[in-house]
């Protein structure tokens, strides 16, 4: 008893196709992941840039507050350098300066110059070093305030009393030395305050940690608007000072992208590049050198004829083969009897019948009507066409076409 081997399956299976496409699937997934990370980073950078921006209408911008101040007659100017801020203050009769050093650009000497400004000073969310330089009697308590909590004024500051209570998140502060005259307002249950006023010259210095109350998203909560408008709208001029590149020390270069990148990122990026190149070499398709196909210089017409005949035979296309013979014969017969190539079949049949003496019905059946039901019938009709052409050639005196 013989055992027949199972035929080999040449169609690739789903697992084989997935294995071959694994490299490209992983590559596309990595590209999508990089795009998502880049988009998230871009959105994060955009959010950081708009935070407390007086020109931003985003939820974390402060454009709504600035527009209301302008409607109340306050001139609001944006300054991006210490010198520009001092020039705007000197040109005003009375001014309030809001400092928002979000990128910690100012150093100790520049903060000391800021304190010498002859204006009422309001500092937004100063960090640890800035708090120590601007108000040594005040300590930073971290990001300890929540917008969900209502904080009562609890102090004699007029702007705070008009607001009564606020809701805002951000930095909180503790008064380390009350003998300096520092006053804290809007304290939570842990005695962490959202606002501190420190005596400074004759105008005072205010540290505001709960800065979210100034944003477009939260300005309408509780007494946030009342505090913001009374705190920043006391003078005819408001200078919103955000330190920029011009405040960097002369000769101090901006950190490059390599300086800001973690030390492990560069080796990892190089390794990933090498792995990608190696995977491309390993799994990439190699086309190889070009190969010239050797073809015969001359192909005989008989080979084409025999090939077409075999196709007709394989498809049992007897009528199609006979039609090809009839079309060729009609063209040659028209030329023999002096008709044009556009002559109709009836015209050719009439002319051939007049020359050969055959009946029109016989010629019509041979040239158009008869159907070959077998190979023998096809051969018989082919021979009849050949004899008809010989008869016409004999009558007209022209040599028969081979």
Image: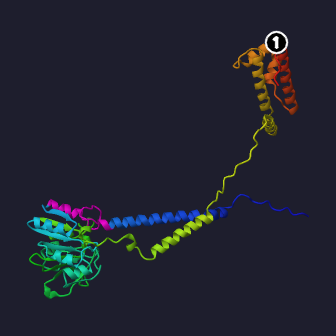
Q: Position of residue 80 (x, y in %)?
A: 22, 66
Q: Position of residue 332 (x, y in %)?
A: 77, 21
Q: How many marks?
A: 1
Of 259 and 370, nearer the camera is 259
210 left or right of 319? Answer: left
- Residue at 77% across, 38% down: 299
Q: Is residue 142 above or below residue 368?
A: below
The magenta stretch spans residue 9: no
**Coloration of the structure image:** rainbow
- Residue at 27% across, 61% down: 57
- Residue at 35% across, 66% down: 45
Q: Position of residue 77 (x, y in %)?
A: 18, 63
Q: Is residue 6 above or below residue 140?
A: above
Q: Which residue is mark 1?
A: 355
Note whether residue 233 is visible. no
Of 128 and 12, nearer the camera is 128
Q: Position of residue 195 (x, y in %)?
A: 20, 77
Q: Is residue 313 above or below residue 5?
A: above
Q: Quadrant of the C terminus?
A: top right
Answer few, some or many: residues within 10 Å of disc 1's Cα (few below 14, many 20 plus, some between 14 and 19): few
> Which contiguous range is marked in magenta?
48-71
60 left or right of 374? Answer: left
- Residue at 78% across, 17% down: 336
Q: Quadrant of the N terminus?
A: bottom right
Of 377 and 293, nearer the camera is 293
Q: Residue furthest right?
A: 1
Tag 1, which secondary structure? helix
The magenta stretch spans residue 58: yes
Note whether residue 277 is visible. yes
């Amino acid at each position: 008893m013989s055992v027949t081997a199972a035929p080999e399956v040449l169609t690739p299976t789903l697992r084989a196709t997935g294995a071959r496409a694994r490299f490209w699937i992983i590559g596309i997934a990595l590209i999508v992941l990089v795009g998502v990370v880049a988009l998230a980073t871009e959105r994060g950078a955009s959010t950081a840039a708009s935070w407390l921006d007086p020109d931003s209408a985003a939820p974390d911008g402060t454009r709504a507050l600035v527009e209301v101040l302008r409607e109340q007659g306050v001139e609001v100017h944006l300054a991006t350098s210490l010198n520009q801020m001092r020039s705007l203050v000197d040109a005003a009769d009375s001014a309030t300066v809001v400092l928002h050093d979000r990128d910690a650009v100012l150093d100790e000497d520049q903060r000391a110059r800021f304190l010498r400004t002859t204006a009422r000073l309001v500092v937004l969310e100063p960090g640890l070093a800035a708090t120590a330089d601007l108000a040594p009697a005040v300590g930073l308590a971290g990001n300890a305030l929540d917008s969900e909590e209502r904080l009562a004024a609890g102090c004699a500051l007029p702007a705070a009393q008009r607001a009564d209570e606020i809701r805002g998140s951000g930095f909180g502060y503790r008064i380390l030395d009350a003998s300096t005259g520092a006053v804290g307002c809007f304290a939570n249950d842990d005695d962490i305050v959202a606002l501190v006023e420190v005596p400074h010259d004759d105008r005072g210095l205010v540290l505001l940690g709960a800065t979210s109350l100034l944003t477009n998203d939260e300005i309408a909560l509780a007494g946030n608007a009342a505090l913001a408008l009374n705190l920043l709208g006391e003078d005819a001029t408001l200078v919103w000072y955000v330190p920029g590149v011009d405040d960097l020390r002369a000769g101090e270069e901006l950190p490059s992208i390599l300086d800001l990148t973690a030390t492990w990122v560069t080796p990892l990026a190089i390794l990933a590049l090498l792995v990608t190149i190696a995977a491309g070499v390993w799994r990439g398709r190699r086309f190889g050198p070009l190969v010239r196909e050797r073809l015969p210089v001359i192909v005989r017409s008989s080979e084409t004829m025999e090939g077409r005949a075999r196709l007709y035979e394989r498809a049992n296309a007897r009528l199609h083969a006979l039609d090809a013979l009839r079309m060729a014969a009609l063209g040659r017969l028209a030329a023999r009897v002096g008709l044009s190539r556009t002559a109709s079949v009836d015209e050719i049949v009439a002319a051939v019948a007049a020359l050969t003496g055959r009946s029109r019905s016989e010629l019509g059946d041979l040239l158009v009507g008869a159907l070959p039901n077998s190979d023998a019938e096809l051969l018989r009709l082919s021979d009849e066409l050949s004899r008809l052409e010989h008869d016409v050639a004999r009558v007209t005196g022209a040599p028969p076409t081979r």
